[in-house]
Amino acid sequence: MRTALNIICVTLLLLLTSCGGGGIECNYELIAHAGGAIDGRTYTNSREALERALANGYRHIELDLALTSDSTLVAAHSWQLFNEISGFAHKGDTAPTLDEFLSRRIYGRYTPLTAKEINRFFLENEELILVTDKISDAAILEENFPTLKKRMIVEAFTHDDYVRLKEQGYHRVFYSCLAGDIDEAVVKHLLLHKIFGDKIEWMALHTSSVEYPLFKVIDALCNYRAAIFTINDTAEIPRELIKKVGYIYTDSIK
C-alpha cells in the first residue's frame, strides 16, 4: 500500500511544476520554544522562562499544554518529561493531580504554569502572542483562553481541529506535520485541499521533513508558509524551506 502510494505521489510530482516557495522573501518571526531556554535549560514551560522570554524581547512565546489527571489545563511538554525534570521520574508518563503539579519545582527551582496563570501573563503583556502546542481541541482552548483568541497561534493536529480553529477566528493556525506523518498529510489533506480549493496556509514542520521523498510533493501541491522547529542557529534552516519560513521555533536565538 505504501509503495503504491509513493508511486502515485511521485507521478503527481512529475506532472506538476514545483512552486518551491519562489518569490517569497525569507522574513521570519522568532517563537520562544516551550517558553524559551532559561539558564541553559529547555522545555521547562515555566513562569521564569516566560519572564525571561519577555525580557529577551520575544513577541511570540510557545507553551506546551497538557491536562492533569483531574482535567486542569497546565503547561508541560509531556508527563514523562515533566515527571523526570521535577524529581518524580519513577512516575513515568502518569499525569499528576493539579495539587501535585503545583507542589513541584522544575529542576528544583522553576515554577510550573497553569492555564489561569498563562492567561493572566498574556493579558498583562498585550504585545505578546501565545503559541500553543500539544492540544488543539477548540473547546478546551476556548474554555481556558476565552479572551486571547485574536492573540493566539494554535498548532492543529487533526484536519477537523484545523478547520474548527480557523472558523473560530484564532490569530493563526498551523497545520502540524511531523516528518513521519508526511505521507498521510499529503494524501488525506494536502492533495484533497488542492483539489477542492480549501487552502492550508501555514504548516508547522520539523527540519527533518525535507528529507522525506514526499516533501517535494507538498511543495508542488501547496503554496504554504512554514513554521519550523527547532532552530538554534539560522544556518540550520533547511535550504528547501528558506523562502517559505515565516516563523522559527527557537530555544535561544534572540
Image: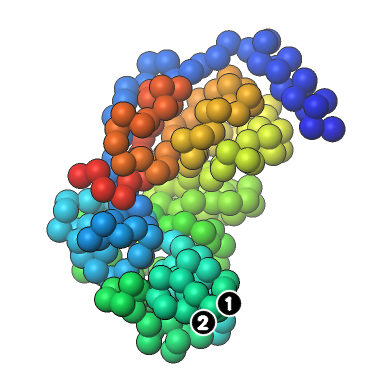
Circle 1/circle 2 CB separation < 8 Å: yes
Q: Pick the residue in front: 75 or 162.
A: 75
Q: Position of residue 101 (x, y in %)?
A: 43, 82
| On-image quarter of the N terminus | top right
Q: Position of residue 224 (x, y in %)?
A: 49, 30
| Residue found 27% across the figure and 76% down from its top | 109
> In terms of secondary structure, where does tag 2 sit?
loop
Left or right, residue 172 beside residue 93: left
Type of amino acid under label 1: Thr
Kindly indicate the quadrant of the structure image that contains residue 178: top right
User: Is disc 2 surrounded by few (<14), some (14 to 19) or many (20+) residues within 10 Å?
Assistant: some
Label disc, if present, on residue 83 of the rendered structure: none
Residue 254 in view of the camera:
yes
| On-image quarter of the C terminus | top left
| Residue found 22% across the figure and 51% down from its top | 58
Q: Which residue is mark 2?
A: 96
Q: Please, is residue 236 above or below residue 18 in the view?
A: below
Coloration of the structure image: rainbow
Q: CA distance from mark 1 to mark 2?
A: 6 Å
Q: Pick the residue in front: 197 or 231.
A: 231
Label disc, if present, on residue 94 of the rendered structure: 1
Residue 129 in view of the camera:
no
Q: Position of residue 32 (x, y in %)?
A: 30, 52
> In terms of secondary structure, where does tag 1 sit?
loop
Left or right, residue 211 beside residue 117: right
| Residue found 54% across the figure and 51% down from its top | 156
Q: Please, is residue 7 above or below residue 187 in the view?
A: above
User: Is disc 1 surrounded by few (<14), some (14 to 19) or many (20+) residues within 10 Å?
Assistant: some
| Residue found 69% across the figure and 39% down from its top | 184
Left or right, residue 183 beside residue 124: right
Type of amino acid under label 2: Pro
